[in-house]
Amino acid sequence: QVQLVDSGGDSVQAGGSLSLSCVSSGYTVTDYWMGWFRQAPGKEREGVASISGDGRTFYANSVKDRFTISRDDDKKTLHLQMNRLQPEDTATYYCAAAPAAFGPQSYCTGGLCYRNDGRPIGYWGQGTQVTVSS
């Protein structure tokens, strides 16, 4: 049974940093794509960053050069280091996993986001709130 538990959200001032974590279980991390999505109030969920099973990373343009996604295979933990945070980064952040490719350009609608093959991303963390004040 695949489980994802994300944590690390907090309230920070603009320009600050946060590190999110997602502990996974129930699958082999190197066989899965993992990533982070975020959802602000009144907006669709959107992709932030993803990492393939073999470690390739992908970023949304809005976070490139500020955020870093990484994975600790031994601890089965996904990380998102967020630097130079801005008020527009305020959202609930969700960890996601799937046995097929997805990325920050994944299509999301109605609370669902889709893999590159068109099937829904099936595994999600419960979400962690990031609030950035100006």
Image: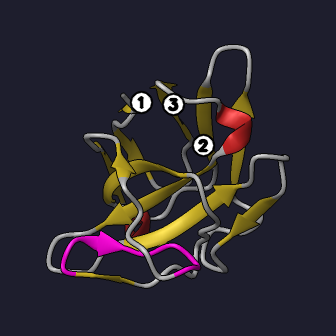
Chosen colour scheme = secondary structure
Magenta residue span: 110-117
Q: Residue at x 14, y 79 (%)?
A: 42
Residue 20 point in image, percent of width and height: 50, 36
Mostly what secondary structure, the magenta segment? loop
Q: Are marks 3 and 2 in contact (CB under 8 Å)?
A: yes
Instruction: Give the residue pinned by disc 2.
Output: 80
Instruction: Give the residue pinned by disc 3.
Output: 21
Residue 56 numbered tag:
none
Residue 54 point in image, percent of width and height: 85, 47
- Which numbered disc flags the more N-terminal residue, 1 or 3? 1
Q: Residue at x 69, y 68 (%)?
A: 59
Q: Amino acid at mark 2?
A: Leu
Spatial distance from mark 1 to mark 3, Cα to Cα?
Answer: 6 Å
Instruction: Give the residue pinned by disc 1.
Output: 8
Q: Are marks 2 and 1 in contact (CB under 8 Å)?
A: yes
Res 80 quadrant in image: top right
Of marks 1 and 3, the one in the foreground: 3
